[in-house]
Amino acid sequence: MKHKFLLIYAWFVRTILFFLPDIPFIMRFRGWLYGLGMRKRGRDFQVTHNTIIKSLQNIEVGNNVFIGNFSVILAAANVIVHDEVQIGPNVIIISGNHTKLNGSYRFGKPDREEIILERGSWVSANCTIAKGSMLPSGSVLAANSLLNKKHTTKDGIYGGVPAKLLKKE
């Protein structure tokens, strides 16, 4: 029941505040409202007007987090976003996947794993972050990349499909 209520609540927040401009005060207010349904929300959480966030109860967000335009977060499993993370426009974060049953993906059991974006990381535009992924502290996920596994090197630039370490900083 809580999940269904939070889906309606997230839709309500997005709908009511959709036409307000993306200025820091309003983006913080949007983040504060979303945070009421989250497991944890830090201060200065900013969300742009056309971001879609579902399954609020599985999301933790640290301090000074920004989510850019047209981004989508589908948190079937835990999504943990640490302090000072920037998420660019058109980013898809999805902590679940489909499995096949009797030759069809329609009725297969869901496959869900946690996603972690560590402190100070930056997810550039048009990236996809899949289940079971981790972006290390102080790292950049280059534009148009797919992050689909846990990376442990700190302060690196990751890119490609699938993302790999391009440069250690």
Image (cartoon, helix red, strand yellow):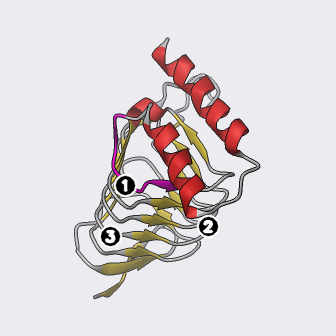
Closer to the camera, 91 or 33? Answer: 33
Q: Residues within 10 Å of mark 2 (few under 14, many from 20)?
A: some
Residue that protrudes farthest toward the top in the picture? 1
- Compare marks 2 and 3 and give the one earlier in the sequence: 3
Would you name the residue on which mark 3 appears? 120
Q: Comparing marks 2 and 3, which lies closer to the viewer? A: 3
In which quadrant of the rendered image does the C terminus lie? Answer: bottom left
Which residue is at a point 23% across and 75% down the rendered structure image?
154
In percent of width and height, residue 110 lies at 48, 29
Q: CA distance from mark 1 to mark 2?
A: 16 Å
For the residue marked with disc 3, what is the amino acid?
Answer: Gly
Cα distance in 3D space between marks 2 and 3: 19 Å
Q: Which residue is mark 1?
A: 133
Q: Pointer 3: residues within 10 angstroms few (<14), some, or many (20+)?
A: many
Residue 7 lies left or right of residue 156; in this view the side is right
Which of the 4 image quarters holds residue 40? Answer: top left
Q: Please tell me which residue is depicted at 55% across the width and 67% down the height of the picture.
A: 88
Q: Residues within 10 Å of mark 1 (few under 14, many from 20)?
A: many
Q: Mark 1, mark 3: which one is toward the viewer?
A: 3
Query: How far across and down, in percent of the image, does residue 56 sit?
Result: 47, 34
Above or below for 38 versus 84:
above
In the figure, 91 relative to 59: above or below? below
Of residues 108 and 156, the one nearer the viewer is: 156
The residue stretch that appears in magenta: 39-47
Q: Are marks 1 and 2 in contact (CB under 8 Å)?
A: no
Residue 138 location in percent, x, y?
30, 74
Viewer-nearest of labels 1 and 2? 2
* 87 to the left or right of 135: right
Q: Earlier in the sequence, mark 1 or mark 2?
A: 2
Which residue is at a point 42% across and 47% down the rendered structure image?
Answer: 131
Q: Give the residue furthest to the right.
A: 19
Residue 126, label in figure: 2
